[in-house]
């Protein structure tokens, strides 16, 4: 198997405590590194950047200094892994703000005359989205149709050319217990080894 360049993006917004998302991201990264994949990591909660407040800033403003190296990491990567908890039915606001700053015109896509969808700037990359939640994953998937994850996959990742995008939904996290957590860590370690 050819080594894959993997960027693991830890999207839990709490930098002051260790959460399941941190352990899952570490398990994936350790699994990937154990078989020779190149691994870089980004912990969004440890980055200092402003929230975008205008279309003009998004289109013409400079990428914040803390995020310029992250764009370089995204350019380097062949596979992106996003790990975050479901908050109010969606990704945490800090992760959304991070993506808005990163996925700017001229980097994530380029405008094209006569093409309303532009030219996708991040083609050739795949992704995995790993989401933890309190509700059972089947309820989120079937009752709520995993709407926020589908939106991320289609409206952000797909829009800039990242495909395929696979997902891992981990529900009922408050009732997993030590054995349940270990089973998920083992699964993520294997996904990392497989660069899946």
Image (cartoon, grey):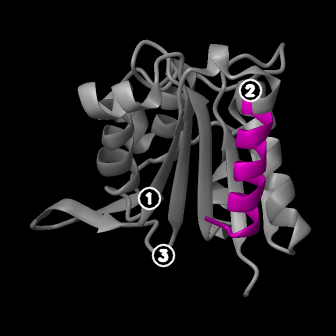
Residue beneath disc 3: 124
Residue beneath disc 2: 20
Q: Earlier in the sequence, mark 1 or mark 2?
A: 2
Foreground tag (2 vs 3): 2
Say few, some or many: other residues with alpha carbon within 10 Å of mark 2 (under 14 / 14 to 19 / 20 or more).
some
Task: Describe the element under mark 3 as helix, strand or loop.
Answer: loop
Could you give the CA–CA distance between mark 2 and mark 3, rounded to whole angstroms? 30 Å
Could you give the CA–CA distance between mark 1 and mark 2, rounded to whole angstroms? 22 Å
How many numbered marks are there?
A: 3
Which residue: 80% across, 72% down? 37
Q: Earlier in the sequence, mark 3 or mark 1?
A: 3
Task: Describe the element under mark 2 as helix, strand or loop.
Answer: helix
The quarter of the picture where residue 4 lies is bottom right
Badge number at residue 165: 1
Which residue: 72% across, 70% down? 5
Q: Which residues are drawn in magenta?
A: 180-196
Residue 38 in view in this figure: yes
Q: Are marks 1 and 2 in contact (CB under 8 Å)?
A: no
């Amino acid at each position: 198997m050819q080594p894959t360049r993997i960027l693991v993006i830890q999207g839990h917004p709490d930098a002051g405590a260790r959460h399941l998302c941190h352990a899952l991201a570490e398990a994936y990264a350790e699994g990937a590194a154990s078989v020779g994949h190149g691994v870089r990591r980004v912990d969004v909660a440890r980055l200092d950047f402003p929230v975008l407040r205008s279309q003009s800033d998004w289109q013409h403003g400079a990428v914040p200094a803390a995020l310029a190296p992250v764009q370089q990491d995204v350019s380097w990567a062949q596979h992106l892994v996003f790990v975050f908890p479901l908050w109010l039915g969606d990704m945490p606001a800090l992760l959304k703000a991070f993506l808005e700053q990163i996925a700017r015109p001229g980097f994530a896509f380029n405008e094209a005359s006569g093409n309303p969808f532009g030219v996708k700037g991040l083609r050739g990359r795949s992704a995995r989205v790993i989401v933890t939640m309190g509700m059972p994953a089947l309820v989120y998937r079937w009752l709520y149709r995993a709407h926020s994850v589908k939106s991320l996959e289609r409206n952000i990742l797909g829009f800039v050319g990242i495909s395929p995008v696979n997902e891992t939904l981990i529900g009922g996290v408050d009732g997993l217990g030590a054995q349940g957590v270990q089973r998920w860590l083992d699964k993520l370690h294997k996904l990392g080894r497989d660069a899946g």
